[in-house]
Image (spheres, rainbow, N blue to C red):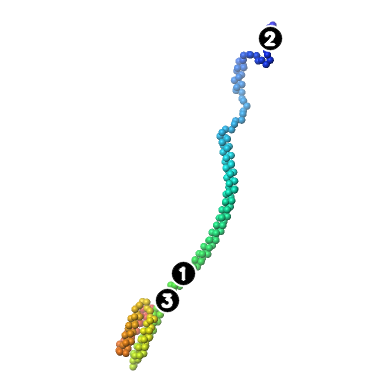
Amino acid sequence: MPELKKHKKNEIPNEEPTAMTEEAKPAEEHLPEKSEKKAPSKFSRFLRMVGVGILLVTLGAAALFLAVYIPQTDDLKAQIKAAQTEVNAAKAEVTTANTEIGGLKAVEAKLTQAKSDLVTLQGKLDKVSAQKSVYQIQSNVNTARIALLQTPKDSARAAQSLGYIIQNLGTLEVPAFPDITKNLGTRLTDINTTITTDPTKALSDLEALFNDLVLLADNIK
């Protein structure tokens, strides 16, 4: 009986792999391995960083708003309130001023009307004054006529009446007839001369003068 060879400890016999062993290797390569956690991709990390950045910006903006904008807003509100108070006061002053202006306009209108009335009244007064002077002249002319119609003729009285007329000519003002005083003065001087030299002619001239004064008084109205 042949003697068996002893193998060294831990020595694997050099055996040729069997077909079974060769075929088993591919099977072992395809065995499912334990799944490992995949590392986050670069895009995921980028998104996470962007989110963190946005959060930080938002927090910074909120802090800035709380620290800066809210006090400024409160200050602006206070300024707006003060400005509104000033606007209301200004409106009240404008209303008061408009009321006063309305009153002043009413007074101004009354003053304008008063001035117009004064001009009208002054015109009427001038006419009345002129008529009064004309009537006084007519009265003295009639007195002179009566003196010359008497028998015997009272030439002295007639001359005296003409002297009064000449004196009253200084008060006669007729705007429509600016030369009336000069014309009457010339005629009265001529009549005063003929009273003693030609009483008949003087009487005729006095009658013509009286008729002209009647027409003058009518035109002054």
- Residue type, mark 2 in image: Leu
- Residue type, mark 3 in image: Gln
Q: Which of marks 2 and 1 precedes in the sequence?
A: 2
Q: Quadrant of residue 199?
A: bottom left
Q: Which of marks 1 and 3 precedes in the sequence?
A: 1
The residue that disc 3 covers is 122
Above or below, 83 relative to 215 = above
Tags 3 and 1 in contact by the CB under 8 Å rule?
A: no
Q: Quadrant of residue 193?
A: bottom left
The residue that disc 1 covers is 109
Disc nearest the viewer among 2 and 3:
2
Above or below, 215 relative to 88 = below
- Say what secondary structure mark 1 lies in: helix
Q: Quadrant of the C terminus?
A: bottom left
Q: In the drawing, what numbered circle is on residue 4?
A: 2
- Say what secondary structure mark 3 lies in: helix
Quote the CA–CA distance across marks 3 and 1. Answer: 20 Å
Q: Is residue 202 visible?
A: no
- Say what secondary structure mark 2 lies in: loop
Q: Is residue 132 visible?
A: yes
- Residue type, mark 1 in image: Ala
Tags 2 and 3 in contact by the CB under 8 Å rule?
A: no
Q: Quadrant of the N terminus?
A: top right
